[in-house]
Image (cartoon, rainbow, N blue to C red):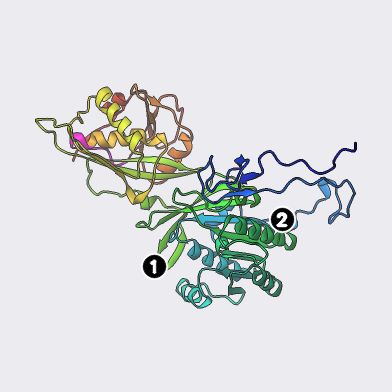
Amino acid sequence: MAKSTAPKPLKDPFRCAECGWSTNKWVGRCGECQAWGTVEEIAAPKKLSLIATSVTNAALPIGDVAIESARARTSGVPELDRVLGGGLVPGAAILLAGEPGVGKSTLLLTVAAESARRGLTTLYISGEESTSQVRLRAERLGALDKELWLASETELGSVISHIDEVEPALLIIDSIQTIGSAAVDSAPGGVTQVREVAAALIRLCKERAITLVLVGHVTKDGSIAGPRLLEHVVDVVLQFEGERHSRLRLIRAIKNRYGASDEVGCFDLHDGGIEGLPDPTGLFTTRHIDPVPGTCVTVTLEGRRPLLAEIQALVSAAKDVDYGNARRVTSGLDNSRTAMTLAVLELRAGIRLTGRDVYAATVGGMKMTEPAADLALALAVASAAKGLALPADLVAIGEVGLAGEIRKVSGVQRRLQEAHRLGFKRALVPLGSEAKLDGMEILEVARLEQAISRVKIQNG
C-alpha cells in the first residue's frame, strides 16, 4: 500500500503572535503572555522545493562588497544621531515607540525638516492627522522645506504610490497602527495588519535604500504594541519616554544593529518645539546660594552617559509617641530600594527615623533606579534628619548594602570626570574604586556610618 504524501497535521496549529505560545485549539486569550486576540491559526508546513532559482545579487568576497551606500547620514539632530550610532543608514528600518503625547510626532517632524534641509528628499506619511494639521505644527516648529513632502494616508497601496512618485531618501510613517492593507482580512491596527504592512514597507525600503522610520504605540504597561515580531524585523528599536508634566524627554536604544544599544539622548520639549540637550545636568540639579539641609548630588549613568542628579529629602520632626503611621513618599526613586536604604540608615548609622515622615524626590522629574544613588539618598535623608547641610561641592556615589557596607559600582572614573567638569571638588566613593582625578578630593568609604562621619557638615 502506497504511503500518503500529504503533510502531517500540526500538533498545535494555533500560535500566539506576541510570544509564540502554541495550543491545539483556538482561544481568545494567550495562556502565556495573557494578550487578547493574538492567537492565530498557522498554516501546515509545505514541502520545500530543492530546485535552484535565479539570484538577485551575486555572491562576492566580503572584501569586495561596497560599503559607501550603507554609511550613516546625519539626521540633523545630534542627540538622535548619538543614539542611532552616527545617523540614518540607507535601507535601515527604525521603530520609534512611546506613549501618546510624549512628543514622537514633534521629534520626527523636526528630523524630517532637518534632513530635508541637508538635501535628503523626505516623505512624511501621517495616518492620524490631516495634512493641514501637520502643516500648522510644522509652521510652529519652523519645519518647512521644499524637500519635505507630506501626505495623509491610511491605505498601504496609496502609501506605495506616494513612494513611487516622490522617491524619498527618508520615509516616516506616523503611525504603523493606522496603515492597513485591503489584501489582509482584518481591521487596521490588528496584529495581522501591523505585521503584514510593516513587512511590505521594510522590504520595499531595503530594495530602494530608503531609510524607514515607523512610529509605534505602546500598551498600558509601557511595552511596544503590536506583534513581537515587529521588533525582530526592524534594525533599530527606540523608546521615547518622559513625564507628561516635565519638559525632559529621553530616547533610548533598545536594539541597534548599527551602534551601541545603551546610548541615551536627552531632549527639551517646550512650546516652540523640541531640541537636543547636549548638557542636560541643569535640569536635574539646583545650585543653592546657601547650603540647604536634605540635598545631595550624585552621578548616574544613563547608558554610557554620566548625568548629575540631585536627590532631595525632607524628614518631619521627631514625635514623643510613635503611632506607627509614619509616611514614606518617593518621587523619581524606587520605593522598595528607598525603604531598604532608610532601614539601613536607621539600624546601621543610628539616624532615628522611626515615627518620622520621610519624603524623597529627584529634581527635574528624573527617574533613578540604579543602586549607585543609594549613598546620595542616605546622605540626603541624614542631612534632613539632623537639620544640617552637606557641602555644596560634594557628590556621593555608591551602593548601600543591608549590612551597611558601601559597594563598588561601575564607571566611577567616568562619573567623577563629569562631576569635576561641572565644578564639584569633593566626592565620596566606595572603598577600592581606585579613582584618581587632579583637582578633586576623593574620599573612599567602606561603611555608611563612616561616610556620614567623614562628611564635613555645615550649619544650615
State the residue at coordinates (57%, 58%): 190
State the residue at coordinates (34%, 51%): 364
- Camera-side residue: 309 or 158? 158
Would residue 49 be found to the left or right of residue 86 on screen? right
Would residue 348 be found to the left or right of residue 13 on screen? left
Question: Residue at label 2?
Answer: 70
Give the x, y percent position of residue 118.
62, 68
- Camera-side residue: 293 or 23? 23
**As displayed, is residue 379 above or below residue 249?**
above
Q: Amino acid at mark 2?
A: Ala
Res. 313 in view: yes
Residue 40 shown in magenta: no
Q: Secondary structure at mark 1?
A: loop
**As displayed, is residue 365 above or below residue 207?**
above
Quarter of the picture holding the N terminus? top right
State the residue at coordinates (56%, 46%): 27
Label 2: few (<14), some or many (≥20) within 10 Å? few
State the residue at coordinates (45%, 48%): 221
Question: Residue at label 1?
Answer: 271
Q: Which residues are magenta?
A: 384-395
Say whether disc 1 or disc 2 marks the residue closer to the N-terminus: 2
Q: Amino acid at mark 1?
A: Asp
Q: Determine whether label 1 and label 2 are within 8 Å by CB.
A: no
- Camera-side residue: 140 or 42? 42
Q: CA distance from mark 1 to mark 2?
A: 36 Å
The quarter holding residue 331 reads: top left
Q: Secondary structure at mark 2?
A: helix
The quarter holding residue 351 reads: top left
Give the x, y percent position of residue 65.
81, 51
Res. 85 in view: no
In the rendered image, the residue lying farthest to the front is 1
